[in-house]
Image: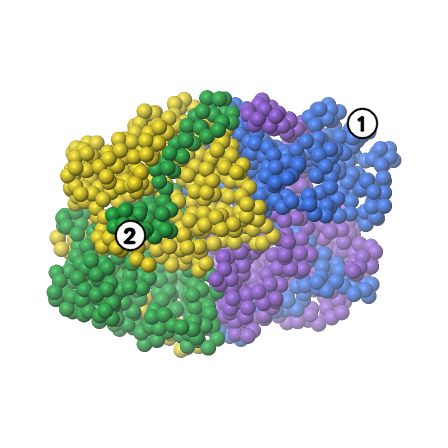
Chain colours: A green, B yellow, C purple, D blue
Amino acid sequence: MTTAFAALGRKLRLGVIGGGPGSFIGPVHRAAALLDRRYEIVAGVLSSNPERCREGAAELGITPYTDVRTMLAAERLDAVAIMTPNDRHYDECMAALQAGVHVICDKPLTNTRAEAAAIVAAAEGKVFCLTHAYTGYPMIRQARAMVAAGVIGALRAVQVEYLQAGMSTPVEQGVLTDKLRWKLNAGRSGPSLVLGDIGTHVHHLVCYVTGRPLVRLAADLGAIVPGREVDDYGAFLLRLKGGIRGTLTASQALAGTENDIHLKVYGELGHIAWSHRSNNHLELALNGRPAQRLARGDADLLPPAARVLRVSRGHPEGLTEAFANLYRDAAEAIAARITGHAADPLALDFPTAEDGEAGLAFVEAALASRRAGGNWVDV
Amino acid sequence: MTTAFAALGRKLRLGVIGGGPGSFIGPVHRAAALLDRRYEIVAGVLSSNPERCREGAAELGITPYTDVRTMLAAERLDAVAIMTPNDRHYDECMAALQAGVHVICDKPLTNTRAEAAAIVAAAEGKVFCLTHAYTGYPMIRQARAMVAAGVIGALRAVQVEYLQAGMSTPVEQGVLTDKLRWKLNAGRSGPSLVLGDIGTHVHHLVCYVTGRPLVRLAADLGAIVPGREVDDYGAFLLRLKGGIRGTLTASQALAGTENDIHLKVYGELGHIAWSHRSNNHLELALNGRPAQRLARGDADLLPPAARVLRVSRGHPEGLTEAFANLYRDAAEAIAARITGHAADPLALDFPTAEDGEAGLAFVEAALASRRAGGNWVDV
Amino acid sequence: MTTAFAALGRKLRLGVIGGGPGSFIGPVHRAAALLDRRYEIVAGVLSSNPERCREGAAELGITPYTDVRTMLAAERLDAVAIMTPNDRHYDECMAALQAGVHVICDKPLTNTRAEAAAIVAAAEGKVFCLTHAYTGYPMIRQARAMVAAGVIGALRAVQVEYLQAGMSTPVEQGVLTDKLRWKLNAGRSGPSLVLGDIGTHVHHLVCYVTGRPLVRLAADLGAIVPGREVDDYGAFLLRLKGGIRGTLTASQALAGTENDIHLKVYGELGHIAWSHRSNNHLELALNGRPAQRLARGDADLLPPAARVLRVSRGHPEGLTEAFANLYRDAAEAIAARITGHAADPLALDFPTAEDGEAGLAFVEAALASRRAGGNWVDV
Amino acid sequence: MTTAFAALGRKLRLGVIGGGPGSFIGPVHRAAALLDRRYEIVAGVLSSNPERCREGAAELGITPYTDVRTMLAAERLDAVAIMTPNDRHYDECMAALQAGVHVICDKPLTNTRAEAAAIVAAAEGKVFCLTHAYTGYPMIRQARAMVAAGVIGALRAVQVEYLQAGMSTPVEQGVLTDKLRWKLNAGRSGPSLVLGDIGTHVHHLVCYVTGRPLVRLAADLGAIVPGREVDDYGAFLLRLKGGIRGTLTASQALAGTENDIHLKVYGELGHIAWSHRSNNHLELALNGRPAQRLARGDADLLPPAARVLRVSRGHPEGLTEAFANLYRDAAEAIAARITGHAADPLALDFPTAEDGEAGLAFVEAALASRRAGGNWVDV
């Protein structure tokens, strides 16, 4: 089958909004956009600071703008990708949609439900992708497909949690980074920091995998770090559609955690369990049978998971990055040769032809030992 | 400090050799080359089949060639990336080096040590990067740096293994894929299949992390699948420089394994352990202290590891790919809108504005429950 | 220091109540009582069925009784151990305490708080041990001691759960075992099956480790298996003394679980985590430092943990049972020799002198290989 | 079926040799002997030191002897259990066998193969149990039964290792414990310390599980701690009967390890993997299927494993010890009440009736919350 993208016959023209110099999420969005060669990033409003707009755009080799509407008017964009602070999303989404441009937007969508509903209405007829990226993991796709296929039978209960440590110390009392400054400003980050930041992620995750919306809850929401004025902890009793019981916990102030997301979905026959830390695997435990560990890349993954794999069984998704580290360091070494500029000494740490020769020396010693009946030989 | 790459002020022009349609490793090399925006892929000899050369090049939007020397003569390349069958590496490396072009080459370098030594000589003055990619993982860089810094004291012993299942069945007797056809041909894959394919990887890994070359070995090398004519199993007793004892096992025929690489390096004070399956972590166990699990992104990683991170603590390297899955699916949906062509239905599975609105409904219900003393409310 | 037990100079005389033929918990109690040679079991009311009382007592070699008060009057007992259905505990505890006998009693203490309070009053001046056995694990003792010592700083939050699968199918509709019959009878098992059975375990566990009583909660309590009349699921939002937030989940109806108990206690500096499945270890994760895995038997365990170890570092508690399996099978073989009766063929599976000889053959071959420069030798 | 032990109608009379005050393995042997109520320990030669013989025997309440032959002549023993230094085993075994007594003996059987063969001959017609206790774990029994049943198909390869840290420091240079003194004396501990101590354990384990004797090996045997005169490291290439390849590594000098035993057995269809640290589980990984984690207590364990379980699914073997910790502490408290002697304060840490009342308070608060629609209530 030809895909629509193949039928298009060209890359999509993408403008980026936010993600300027120093941003954590900006590079992730841009690398993700480029990874499968379906977008070219042509323009951007990278920062609210005009100087940094230009700087960032120059580094990326794209046309700089300082105003979203100007960019939308000047460029023939297919889509924009929005990665600004939460309070900016509404205006930027509306501007793009009104300009007839498709939107990819970071979460949370907005700071109020009313704004969110307005965007939903304005997005009629347009593509709108909200980057709840955890649902992009192959094994989450597999989990959703297995639940839908009835592998664990009728649903009974769910448990989901997102545990971070970043705000377990009184960060308010130190020097604030830009990111922290807007996050600690409730006018910008929204009515409940922990929920906007990470609570909506696991809310979406559990609804996505079960296919059930949330219909009722009881909340224990507040701050567990003394003196804090924004929320850093939320625990919830849940009722999903159909009477499914569950719990959801999200906190940014649980010291010693490691950005841990855990999801368990229980059905009448068994349950599935997924952990962010082992995102290449999914556990399936059916009553009366040994627990099974499904691996990304297993032969029998369901189509929604199989189609989003990039590397083969046993290779974690991070393999591409491991390769990229060698390519990046080689680029530095090559650039040093071309320019005569000193290379970053830490970059000169990739395997070379000498290592290749050493590898062959190993192989030939192995063959020599075999010829000697498996006995010891020098390399 | 300005890097040499920044001083260069442009991307490097890269030609690719091999990795045409259907290749596993080709897309990994190319995605890795592009991830950090340091290369542009401009030309390629993608296959030994002229038809597939053109097809693949068209898909990538690069200039097609069917002959390496022609490409080297016609294009002003900074570097080539070689990902062909092992028996081709020697000629292609030599051609590139003689043309004055830097080389990035897949492993094993060649099929004989003599050829390898010739490449080493020819590479004098050029950058030559051999993609033993496992040494690109941040936690392997950390391991090497910790060993070098004396964290585990004087070295005592090593254990390393690379265990695969792909050849645990008599694949020779089935329909051969192209890849399998050349691998089972000893003239092409080299004198010991298991060693060329994966043995050299772990040989390099253990030498890289310890900083010690191999000086002596005893081998148990052969086939464990009855009737097989190529090697699929090698176990070794090792002596690294300085009298360090160790073992190395590599096999492609251990049924039920999952491309498992395990490395342990023991010193007088403790040991470090790394497993491919948990490549975002590294275990450090010192005598008399609880074992420690270092996480990619921990605040105190040593510089060689810290500099190759792309995402923050707790986010596995695969996060970029998870984001990319959303971007790719959004591209399909956008392309469908633009062209009127039907979208791949499996692609229509990304979070949308409606999901964003549901997230805000969750947040607002949480706030309402809090206002009601934490009691139950409808969403 | 001399212990009180050493000063006593004899074993304690113990009577057992409940735990007759077919019981799961009876043998565990009795083995536990005998393991450290501090009790002799002299008498018992093993069942409500007189026939099984006699049978069980004969098998154990103790004096049989069919009535608790008769046993208390006739035997000079130091203590009784009670392991009957929940609705019997109150009468039996009161009888023992009124007879001046110390009590060891299985949980839950009673079916109502009023009865529990009466026992508390009656136990004044007596030893009363309630077997919430999970607090007997060395690493739980360590956790409590670490929290008390301030290792994780001021407490912030807790998470605890006890997840079982035994009632995830509609067991009510099948043939009922004796145990299931009384459990499904709310008059006998108490007002909330899941809470009496396992909820009180984790309630105790979290209060024990934190040293904080529970002061407030919101409950989601009921049955998740359709048509069930007893509770099989309870999830709770908690407030421990001092405003510590937390969650507690207990369910016997989560298909595919494996009697999983998980505990996490978060403080300002880090957290501790324990899982029943890995009960020989405890995780300590402090902000800014790699996570640590404390092992039962580590040199620096705190005294409350160190004093309850039986085997050395690296040996799980189950080592005693592994040894015991060999002893038991040897007993069967020896008894067969003495009696001429055929031995249970499955018991004849323990290592023998021939295995010992094979071990020495291995050692001597190893020495021969070393003499031959490490080369191959026959065994 | 009646077992031979039931037909015997009495406990076996056991004499113990070795394991006196201060011994690690003595209490493990004795607890194991008593756990299933099949032996009574009646007499013992507990130490080579007459004083400690008497002391230890008094503590155990058994008849003391200072000479094995005297004990054998004076007592009507059914069996002896031997847990002395290795160089004593031969004489003691022969004395017991010549006296017509069955023998349970710690490993290694002897220090030479010739002695071992003599014991094999003398044991003809007697029961001789060598306590390679790791084969007593239920999941090792399961592994052996699965291999025998062909679950992983024809065998292909094995990997086994036993890694300890106890001798990773130059213990020779410190104050020697009694145990260390005889171990470091090659005349007493045998020709290769590491092999006698732990190498024979894993040699037995791999032969036991595969059912295949070892027929050939190449050795790398010696000391990795500089200056050491006894062996602390052995790595081996193996050939089991039938041409099965494999590796075995045993070392007592790998810093930071935790008494780790790992076993993997590979067949044509898949492999099984077991680790001492997770001895309640066994992994089964079959080609083309998700890896399975079998749990001790799973419904479908094979008979040789099912028959050696003591507690139900999800309860680790150590549960008995956890219970026993409560019983032991209660004994101390009770003894304090009886004698008036102060109790060990660390022992006063077991759950009491007050804890039981607190549990019921939790239950009743949960019920009150349910009556209030699941909303918050005070406890």
Amino acid at pointer 1: Gln
Q: How many marks?
A: 2
Could you say where residue A289 lies in the image, as x and y percent from the top left?
A: 47, 44
Q: Residue at x 85, y 40 (%)?
A: D65
Does any portion of residue D288 appear in the rendered image?
Answer: no
Mark 1 or mark 2: which is in front? 2
| Badge 2 amino acid | His
Find residue B76 and report its image quarter. Answer: top left
Q: Is residue C201 visible?
A: yes
The residue at which mark 1 appears reads as: D98
Classify mark 1: residues with Cα within 10 Å, few (<14), some (14-19) or many (20+): few
Q: Quadrant of the N terminus of chain B?
A: bottom left
- As rendered, which of C73 and D280 lies closer to the eye? D280
Mark 2 highlights which residue? Answer: A341
Give left or right: position of C312 versus A222. right
Report the chain holding disc 1: D
Mark number displayed over residue A61: none
Q: Residue at point 73% right, 33% down?
A: D187
Give me the C-alpha separation between circle 1 and circle 2. 86 Å
Q: Chain of mark 2?
A: A
Give the residue drawn at x 41%, y 39%. Answer: B204
> How far across and how far down the image is residue C51, in percent?
72, 48
- The answer to whether the residue labelled 1 contacts the one labelled 2, judged by CB atoms less than 8 Å apart, is no
Instruction: Determine the image quadrant of residue A68.
Output: bottom left
Q: Residue at x 53, y 49 (%)?
A: B152
Mark 2: secondary structure: loop
Looking at the picture, tell me which residue is in the foreground, C186 or B361. B361
Say which element carries label 1.
helix
Quarter of the image with the C terminus of chain B is: bottom left
| Label 2 crowd (10 A; few <14 / some 14-19 / many >=20) | some
**Image x and y of residue C367, in percent:** 63, 28
